[in-house]
């Protein structure tokens, strides 16, 4: 054997020996994942998920692009995007009636390569599933079906958009510029994806999806929380008509709207909110939809919104076209409630009573009247009652566990009204920054006890039974991703 071939063999052996001393980080990912999906119970996988995700993302980030391209673990199904900008590895987990999709992906999100790990619940108790690569409207996604392939249990419409949305809705581990850049990626990919936005979005939990009772209107919204405690919303609105599906991108311009409770707006001048409920109603022989929403405000306050949307001229969406909210002396196009960052306000629609019921907000002391950052619920409720003429304001309604919300009788309505619209550019005279639409009567307590973020006892007409067991289950429902408690 000549010297040159011998040297080549020795060099190859030394290279292999050196490589064996530096294990591939992806080997650890495979080992950790196999251990993770073999956990014997649901509690273990839920408890260990954050640690598993962090470790997987750290190891995958350390791997080279070439190593990731070649990595094909035995127990994970590999999905390569047709566009070449994403690769995912998936497995299913099922124990004791609970099932999950465990997956990880690497993709180019904007100008950066990102690696992420996910655990998604499957809407099934089956112990066996089929994981498929799906391509729709040029987007590469993942679909999990039952063993026969007849019923979809989870659909991730676009792997890259899912990864970008995690960045957009993250709370602390991403910079403001990273969130804005990731949002731009989502908008570019989903803006014209009609079938994706109107289809199954179960695999995009970072998006808040709401459908109207008649299934004609859909809202898809999300929220960005910035480092200075400000926030901004975004999303899409879709309307199904006999001519097809019309979709508009929603652009949040809250800071530019001078009198938000009186302004007629559109999708390009939108009072942004994360919509959580849609109520269909008719007014003046036209169809309207009332949208219940939430948005962060600033470092000291949070905001609840009741919006009204309709189909305007040329099929475009119009917000606040009609003055739908009726008060004794004035009517308003939308309602905006501001309250302390330390408080939590509930708002729900009672279909039986046809009322939007919400916490009455009160300052924690009289000297703080008119300052939203000191307002919170006082354990009594106001409402808007649906009438042929719009939503009529009801003060201090009775709410019981047995009967739900009960509208006030007409002969009991002896309310003065000194409410004026909330204006972005000045401090309104009405209490709670425009959230208290009437002067309180003696039916409510005038106590100055601090509520400290919690409801306090009031002298409203509610029964003692309802005080302990309100139909509004505080702290549940209408959740917003990565936003402080509402």
Image (cartoon, rainbow, N blue to C red):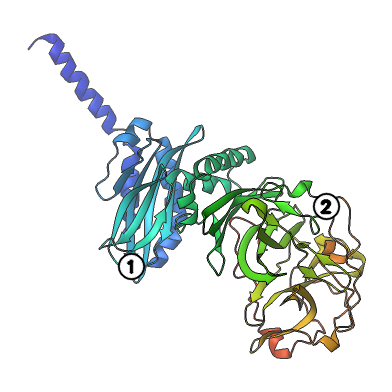
Q: Provide residue 233's location: percent of width, then percent of height.
A: 65, 51
**469 or 110: which is nearer to us?**
110
Q: Residue 458: which numbered mark, if any? A: none
Question: Where does residue 179 sit, x and y in percent of width and height?
Answer: 59, 42
Residue 373 sits above or below residue 165 on the image:
below
Percent of width and height locating residue 394: 79, 78
**With 260 as the anchor, is 149 left or right in this view?**
left
Q: How many residues crowd mark 1 within 10 Å: few (<14), some (14–19), many (20+)?
A: some
Q: Does the rendering let one see residue 166?
A: yes
Which of the two residues, 10 or 169, is positioned nearer the viewer here? 169
Q: Quadrant of residue 369?
A: bottom right
Q: Residue at x 60, y 63 (%)?
A: 479
Q: Residue drawn 46% across and 48% down?
A: 54
Asked whether disc 1 touches disc 2, contact meaning CB atoms under 8 Å apart, the reply is no
Q: Earlier in the sequence, mark 1 or mark 2?
A: 1
The residue carrying mark 2 is 424
- Other residues around mark 2 within 10 Å, as few (<14) / some (14–19) / many (≥20): some
Quarter of the figure with the N terminus: top left
Look at the picture and state if 467 lies above or below 71. Answer: below
Query: Is residue 39 shown to the viewer in this render?
Result: no
Question: What residue would you read off at disc 1?
Answer: 95
Helix, strand or loop at label 2? It is: loop
């Amino acid at each position: 054997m000549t010297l040159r071939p011998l040297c080549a063999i020795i060099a190859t052996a030394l290279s292999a020996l050196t490589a064996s001393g530096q294990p591939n980080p992806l080997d650890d990912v495979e080992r950790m994942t196999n251990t993770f999906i073999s956990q014997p119970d649901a509690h273990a996988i839920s408890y260990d998920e954050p640690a598993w995700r962090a470790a997987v993302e750290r190891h995958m980030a350390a791997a080279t692009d070439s190593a990731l391209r070649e990595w094909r673990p035995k127990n994970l199904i590999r999905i390569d995007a047709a566009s070449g900008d994403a690769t995912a590895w998936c497995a299913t987990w099922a124990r004791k009636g609970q099932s999950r999709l465990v997956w990880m992906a690497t993709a180019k999100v904007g100008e950066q390569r990102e690696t992420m790990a996910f655990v998604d619940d499957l809407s099934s108790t089956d112990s066996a599933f089929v994981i498929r690569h799906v391509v729709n409207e040029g987007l590469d996604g993942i679909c999990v079906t039952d063993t026969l392939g007849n019923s979809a249990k989870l659909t991730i419409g676009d792997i890259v958009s899912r990864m970008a949305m995690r960045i957009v809705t993250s709370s602390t581990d991403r910079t403001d510029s990273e969130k804005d850049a990731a949002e731009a990626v989502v908008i570019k990919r989903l803006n014209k994806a009609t079938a994706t936005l109107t289809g199954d979005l179960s695999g995009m939990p970072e998006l808040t999806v709401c459908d109207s009772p008649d299934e004609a209107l859909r809202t898809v919204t999300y929220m960005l929380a910035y480092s200075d405690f400000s926030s901004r919303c975004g999303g899409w609105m879709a309307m199904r008509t006999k001519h097809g599906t019309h979709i508009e991108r929603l652009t949040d311009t809250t800071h530019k709207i001078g009198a938000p409770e009186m302004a007629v707006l559109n999708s390009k001048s939108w009072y942004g909110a994360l919509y959580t409920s849609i109520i269909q109603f008719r007014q003046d022989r036209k169809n309207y939809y009332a949208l219940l929403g939430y948005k962060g405000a600033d470092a000291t306050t949070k905001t609840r919104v009741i919006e009204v949307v309709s189909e305007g001229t040329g099929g475009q969406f119009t917000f606040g076209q009609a003055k739908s909210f009726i008060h004794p002396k004035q009517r308003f196009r939308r309602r905006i409630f501001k309250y302390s960052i330390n408080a939590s306000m509930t708002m729900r629609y009672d279909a039986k009573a046809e009322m939007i019921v919400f916490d009455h907000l009160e300052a924690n002391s009289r000297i703080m009247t008119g300052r939203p950052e000191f307002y919170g619920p006082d354990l009594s409720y106001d409402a808007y009652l649906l009438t042929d003429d719009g939503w009529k304001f009801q003060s201090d309604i009775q709410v019981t566990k047995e009967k739900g919300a009960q509208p006030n009788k007409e002969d009991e309505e002896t309310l003065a009204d000194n409410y004026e619209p909330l204006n972005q550019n000045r401090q309104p005279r009405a209490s709670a920054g425009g959230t208290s639409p009437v002067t309180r009567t003696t039916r409510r307590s005038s106590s100055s006890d601090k509520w400290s973020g919690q409801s306090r006892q009031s002298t409203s007409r509610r029964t003692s039974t309802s005080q302990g067991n309100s139909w509004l289950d505080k702290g549940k429902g209408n959740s917003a991703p990565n936003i402080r408690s509402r």
